[in-house]
Amino acid sequence: MSVKLLHIVAPVFALTGCMSASAPTMVVKPASISEFLTQCDGKNGWSDPAPPINITANVYQVGSCGIVALLITSDDGHILIDAATKQAAPAIASNIERLGFKLGDIRYILLSHEHWDHIGGLPTLQKMTDAKVVALQAAKTALESGRITDEDPQAAVHPEFEAVSDVQVIEDGGKVQLGPLSLTAQATFGHAPGSTSWTWQSCEDEKCHAIVYADSLTAVSGDSYRFSDHPDYIASFSNSLKRVAAFDCDILITPHPSASDLYNRIAGNAALVDPQACEKYAKTARKKLDARLLRETEAKK
């Protein structure tokens, strides 16, 4: 097995290697999208249990009804991105095993950002898998302290969480490599200081797609926080929106599935593959950020 973690700084680029779906320890049995939607009917809570579903090739949603936890598999081991809430962690572990994969074969756990609805289950899953947790420095600071930093617009509203130990730092543009898997960390500061999007390619039957797990881009904050009082934050946030819009992006997946209409797309009610998806996602976020700034300006009058 070849496992390598690189700490480098690099520009955004399209990955050229493809990942093939791995052979599980038994027959893979993801739920059908109809089974998934039936179980989650009327439920979109962050801890509501959901069955695992296949998104494409070797990529599975093993999280809750309202939060994505993304499993990417290979014959050399697997990578999990995000861990939902602490309450959701046991169901995530069960979903991975339902698919026929061993928890001990998960080598890395990555994250989108350092809010409890995405990392609350990290300590539990870290212990169950003995996987290495990898994050940008800004997210590492929060993970190891058990609280988000004061720089975060949501610092006043998010509760503390169980701290995570032994977090490995990856820099913007760094790669997490595991056998044929090669995921690139893309710093997309804005929703949180440690916001990270992940890009890679997955292949099935010699058909490859550029996959983007794009972090949340919403300008959410505590009641007293004003984005317009933090011009440097807005500038970095705006750069992230431009960056996401420019990603090589066939299939968009987001931590909150509703943000990318994920379940409707898996069900075939909208296109799963859309090369303009990231551009549209960023454009929508830009409009919402501009509307937020306008409201703040008008409130001053």
Image: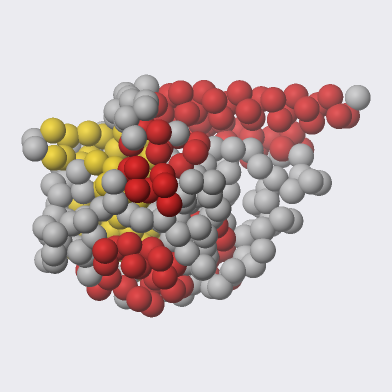
Q: Is residue 233 visible?
A: yes
Q: Is residue 199 visible?
A: no
Quadrant housing the N terminus? bottom left
Quarter holding residue 95: bottom left
Q: Residue at x 56, y 60 (%)?
A: 116
Quadrant housing the C terminus? top right
Rendering coords of residue 75 (x, y %):
12, 59
Rendering coords of residue 11 (x, y %):
35, 37
Rendering coords of residue 283 (x, y %):
52, 23
Classify residue 172 as left or right of residue 292: left
Question: Taking 88 as reference, is 245 above or below it?
Answer: above
Rendering coords of residue 199 (x, y %):
32, 41
Q: Residue furthest right?
A: 301
The answer to which of 206 and 42 lies nearer the viewer is 42
Q: Residue furthest left?
A: 206
Classify residue 107 as left or right of residue 208: right
Q: Residue at x 56, y 73 (%)?
A: 162
Q: Residue at x 18, y 57 (%)?
A: 28
Tally of numbered discs = 0
The answer to which of 102 and 51 lies nearer the viewer is 51
Quarter holding residue 56: top left
Q: Residue at x 71, y 55 (%)?
A: 157
The answer to which of 132 and 259 lies nearer the viewer is 259
Color scheme of the displayed model? secondary structure
The answer to which of 209 and 95 lies nearer the viewer is 95
Question: Taking 36 as reference, is 296 above or below it?
Answer: above
